[in-house]
Structure formats: structure tokens, C-alpha cells
Amino acid sequence: MRWWDSCPLLCDEIGTARDSGTIVRRMWRSLAMVGILAAGVLVAPSAAADDDTSIGAGEVTCRPGPEANCSDVVHKWKFDHNGDLREANFRRAKLHGADLQGARLNGANFRNAVLRGADLSNTDLSDADLRGANLSDADLSDANLSDADLRGADLSGVDLNGVDLSEADLRGADLSDAEPKRANLIRADLRGADLRGARLSFSDMRGVNLSGADLTGAILAQANVTYADLTYANLTGAHLGNAKLAFSNLTGANLSGAALGLAWMQGVNLTDTNLTGANMVGVLISEATWCRTIMDGGLKGDC
């Protein structure tokens, strides 16, 4: 058997040539073709993750980068970018499962975008517009979302461990079953937010606004919630053991069945607060405002 007959990848190119010159020329052309194909296979994966590669399908595509216009782009489960996307426009983009870990996204526009299941850990999203965005089940651990606008955003089931949400606007946002453990929520605006079942243990929530928020069954053990606005918040069955609630306003709040053991509640306003069935063993309470406070034994405090 001739040696070239044992290489089927080259046979089509070599064909029926018999003279040595033709065989050699065709052999080298075939090897070049094989090399190009192999190079394409090897290069393709890295190109998909190249910061300069366009994303999207159909007529809506964009090249991600600072101030890029990627609004309405659809690129599900394969968008991988860990670089500079400052002030980029991803409004209404569908980026399910995107890998943006560590990316610089400060000032970016993700209004009404879908980032469900995305990896946004360690990202800088400060001053970003995330109004109405779907971030359910995403990973935002250790991300910087200070001063971000998250009004009406879906953050249900999101990993928010160590996140910085200081002074962020989260009015009406859904954080049910989210895990912002050890989060920075200093002066964040969570008015009317859904925090049912959220795990906020050890979080810094000084000066947070939780007026009208639903914290049913939420866990705030050892959280710092001093000087907070909790007026008319629903804290039914919430766990506040060892939490700091000093000088917070709990007017009209519902803490029925809440676990308040060893909480620090100096100077709190308990006007019209519902404390029926609450566990207050070891609670450190002094200088509080008692005014029509609802207790197991009836009302406490004259106004």
C-alpha cells in the first residue's frame, strides 16, 4: 500500500495524481486546509469570549464596550464579558445566564433587561439603571450597587452576600428569598419592597427606609437596623434576635410572632405597633415611645 492511501483526509485532494510533483503540491495544499480547520476549532472558543466580538442575533447586534448601544439585543446563556462596560446601554436586552463576573458596569443601563441566572459577582454596578430588570436567581455576591436604581427589579432568590447597596433605590423591588447576608444597605430605599423570607443576618442597615415593606419571615439576626424607618412594615414572624433596632421608627409596624430575643430597642417608636405573640425575652428596651402599642395583654401607652 502506498503511504498516501493510508490518509483519507488527504485522498480527495490528492485524487488520482501519479507524478510526484503533483502529489507533493496537492499534499501541502491539503495539509494547509487541515491546519486552517484545526486553527478554527481551536480559536473559536476564545473568540466567543473576546471582548471585541459582536453579540446578538438577527438584525440586533452590538459590540460590547464602554458606552456601547446594546439595547434589545438577545444573547442568552453565552454572553461572557469581564472587562469594561461602563455606561453601556443594555436596555431591554435578554442576557439570561450571562457571565459578567468582575466587569465594570458603573452607570450602565439595564432597564427592563433580563439577567436571570447571570453571574454578576464582584461587578461594579454603582449608579447603574436596573429599573424593572429581571435578576432572579442571579449571583450578585460582593457586587457594588451603591446608588444604583433598582426600582421594581426582580431580585428574588438572588445571592447578595456581601453586596454594597448603600443608598440604592429599591422601592417596590422583589427580594423575596434573596440572601443579602452581611450586605451593606446603609440608607437604602426599600419602601414597599418584598423581602419575604430574605436572609439579612449581620447586614448593615443603618438608616434604611423599609416603610411599608413586607419582611414576613425574614431573618435579620444580628443585623444593624438602627435609625431605620420601619413604619407600617410587615415583620410578622421575622427573626430579629440580637438585632440592633435602636432609635428606629416602628410606627404601625406588624411584629406579631416575631422573634426579638436580646434585640437592642433603645429609643424606638412603638406607636400603633403590633407586638402580639412576639418573643421579647432579654430585649433591651428603654426610652421607647409606647402609644397604643398592641401587646398580648392589650394596649400599652397613652398618646
Image (tube, rainbow, N blue to C red):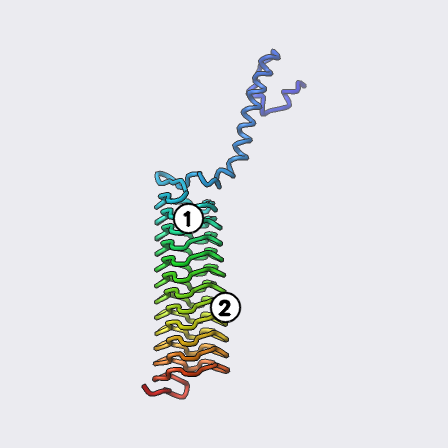
Element on which disc 2 rests: loop
The image shows residue 140 at horizontal and vertical percentages of 46, 56
Residue sitting at x 47%, y 63%: 183
The image shows residue 189 at horizontal and vertical percentages of 37, 65
Q: Which residue is mark 1?
A: 95
Could you tell me which quadrant the C terminus lies in?
Answer: bottom left
Could you tell me which quadrant the N terminus lies in?
Answer: top right
The disc placed on residue 233 is none
Quarter of the image for residue 268 reads bottom left
Quarter of the image for residue 245 reads bottom left
Element on which disc 1 rests: loop
In the rendered structure, which amino acid carries the disc numbered 1? Leu
Q: Which residue is mark 2?
A: 202
In the depicted structure, whether residue 62 falls above or below residue 186 = above
In this view, the residue farthest toward the right is 1
Relative to residue 233, is residue 219 drawn left or right? Answer: right
Q: Earlier in the sequence, mark 2 or mark 1?
A: 1
Q: Which of 168/157 is in front?
A: 168
In this view, the residue farthest toward the top is 19
Residue sitting at x 41%, y 81%: 275
Quarter of the image for residue 132 reads bottom left
Residue sitting at x 47%, y 78%: 264
Q: Residues within 10 Å of mark 1 (few under 14, many from 20)?
A: many
In the rendered structure, which amino acid carries the disc numbered 2? Phe
The image shows residue 55 at horizontal and vertical percentages of 41, 41
Residue sitting at x 44%, y 49%: 104
